[in-house]
């Protein structure tokens, strides 16, 4: 009969019993329990999140099934920490027997007489169980999970760890759980550290976004131009700290009033940066200035746009509107790779005649309303700005009569969602526009009241922007 003997644990992380006849003269002294515990503690303290079973202190104790039960009992007596034994038959792995099952079977009446002087193969037929075998490169956390998924009666059974070249060792389940606890502590500390770092980074990012929000607000006109017989009202509610929507109202050469309402595609920082670019380009180009070789042509050159039925007196308005084409060309020439574009309405109002010359570049229709409701809509006259190089945009013209209100909005109004997902819709907006109103401020307040009642506590998905202007009747009745 063959039995392996323990080797000195002070020089190895595991104990081995070599092939030998099990006689008292062959047996080595078992390793001291204290050295094994200290070794296990050192190993558990050096673990990492990706540590595997081979990094733990394993028991390399094998015994042939032809050996006597008494031989295994002596091995357990010599090493109180030994959790079990690997059973072999002619050197090949056959299974394992745990200390607790071995001692339990021997505690029964007549067990010693039956098994002590008989081969272990007889005892094994009584203690054989399903054996969980995992490879040595299995992660400790995965191995612990597999062990804890076993039936309750097998939870305390040692784990068999298989190495390459058919080497098998035992791992005490208690040691495995201690190692898992140590790794859990490491994971907890790592998560806390990363959470703190993320919180710090988020605070820094929020500070930067707040600066960006303030800079973007500064891009919006703080002082709306005040012109005789005209009242202008606006509202702006970004969905995030920075937005892609913008409106503008500014005085052009010749005392014309420029009105801009735009929605840059996408959201967040990228849209906000392009919002600033679009806004600046429209202002620069409409003011008969040049940038990067793109400039406003003289008043008698109107080749940039399709102009129909406009009187010669409106050529100054037309020249300002050339800013749309120049902005489009600048974006497509310099930023085409970004795929950014904007739907944009740019109107030039003559305060003397109240004629509005405009380009609607793919934007939502604007409406002219009076006491009777919606009078007309200003539909798109061309595609969005920044999509097609060298695009020619059609110019249209309308007349604002006394008490007429021109109102524009971005799709954040009509596509605002209720908690159940329903859109606010154009139909709801038109219904509000059909109702009599006292002023542009009153009209925007009414829309905002219904809009935010519809949104309720749902998250705001898109920027909400509105711009409205009303022609006030003069005292002379003009």
Image (cartoon, rainbow, N blue to C red):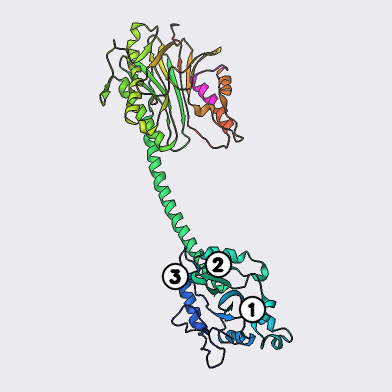
Crowding at mark 3 (Cα within 10 Å: few <14, some 14-19, many 20+): few
Q: Dot 3 corresponds to which residue?
A: 46
Left or right of 226? Residue 173 is right
Q: Start and end of the magenta stretch?
A: 434-447
Which mark is in front, 3 or 2? 2
Q: Is residue 84 visible?
A: no
Q: Dot 2 corresponds to which residue?
A: 134
* Count of numbered tags: 3
Asked whether disc 1 touches disc 3, contact meaning CB atoms under 8 Å apart, the reply is no
Crowding at mark 1 (Cα within 10 Å: few <14, some 14-19, many 20+): some
Q: Dot 1 corresponds to which residue?
A: 100
Q: What SS does tag 1 mark?
A: helix
* Rendering quarter of residue 311: top left
Q: Residue at x 37, y 20 (%)?
A: 391
* Rendering quarter of residue 175: bottom right
Q: Which mark is residue 367?
A: none
Q: Is residue 137 visible?
A: yes
> Residue 430 appears at what percent x and percent y?
56, 20
Asked whether disc 3 touches disc 2, contact meaning CB atoms under 8 Å apart, the reply is no
For marks 1 and 2, the one nearer the N-term is 1
Crowding at mark 2 (Cα within 10 Å: few <14, some 14-19, many 20+): some
Left or right of 260? Residue 78 is right
């Amino acid at each position: 009969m063959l039995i392996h003997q323990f080797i000195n644990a002070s020089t190895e992380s595991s104990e081995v019993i070599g092939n030998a006849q099990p006689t008292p003269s062959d047996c080595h002294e078992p390793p001291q329990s204290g050295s094994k515990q200290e070794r296990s503690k050192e190993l558990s303290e050096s673990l990492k999140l990706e540590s595997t079973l081979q990094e733990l202190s394993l028991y390399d104790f094998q015994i042939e099934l032809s050996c006597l039960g008494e031989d295994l009992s002596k091995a357990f007596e010599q090493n109180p920490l030994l959790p079990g034994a690997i059973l072999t038959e002619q050197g090949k792995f056959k299974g394992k027997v745990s200390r607790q099952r071995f001692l339990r079977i021997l505690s029964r009446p007549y067990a010693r007489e039956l098994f002590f002087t008989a081969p272990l193969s007889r005892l094994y037929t009584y203690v054989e169980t399903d054996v969980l075998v995992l490879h040595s490169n299995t992660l400790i956390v995965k191995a612990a999970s597999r062990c804890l998924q076993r039936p309750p009666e097998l939870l305390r059974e040692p784990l068999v760890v298989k190495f390459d070249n058919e080497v098998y060792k035992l791992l005490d389940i208690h040691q495995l759980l201690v190692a898992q606890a140590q790794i859990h502590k490491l994971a907890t500390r790592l998560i806390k550290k990363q959470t703190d770092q993320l919180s710090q980074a988020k605070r820094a990012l929020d500070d930067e976004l707040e600066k960006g929000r303030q800079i973007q607000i500064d891009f919006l006109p703080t002082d709306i131009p005040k012109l005789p017989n005209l009242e202008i009202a606006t509202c702006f509610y970004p969905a995030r700290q920075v937005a892609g929507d913008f409106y503008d109202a500014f005085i052009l050469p010749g005392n014309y009033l420029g009105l801009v309402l735009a929605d840059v595609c996408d959201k967040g920082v990228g849209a906000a940066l392009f919002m600033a670019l679009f806004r600046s380009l429209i202002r620069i180009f409409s003011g008969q200035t040049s940038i990067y070789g793109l400039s406003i042509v003289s008043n008698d050159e109107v080749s940039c746009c399709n102009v129909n039925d406009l009187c010669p007196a409106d050529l100054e308005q037309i020249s300002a509107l050339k800013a749309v084409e120049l902005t489009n060309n600048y974006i497509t020439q310099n930023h085409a790779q970004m795929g950014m574009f904007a739907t944009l309405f740019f109107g030039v109002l003559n305060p003397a005649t109240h004629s509005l010359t405009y380009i609607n570049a793919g934007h939502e229709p604007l409406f002219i309303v009076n006491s009777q409701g919606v009078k007309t809509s200003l539909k798109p006259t061309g595609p969005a700005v920044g999509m097609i190089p060298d695009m020619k945009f059609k110019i249209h013209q309308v007349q604002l009569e006394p008490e007429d209100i021109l109102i524009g909005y971005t799709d954040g109004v009509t596509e605002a969602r209720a908690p159940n997902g329903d859109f606010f819709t154009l139909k709801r907006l038109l219904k509000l526009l059909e109702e009599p109103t006292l002023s542009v401020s009153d009209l925007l307040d009414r829309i905002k009241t219904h809009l935010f009642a519809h949104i309720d506590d749902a998250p705001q998905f898109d920027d909400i922007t509105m711009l409205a202007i009303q022609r006030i009747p003069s005292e002379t009745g003009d």
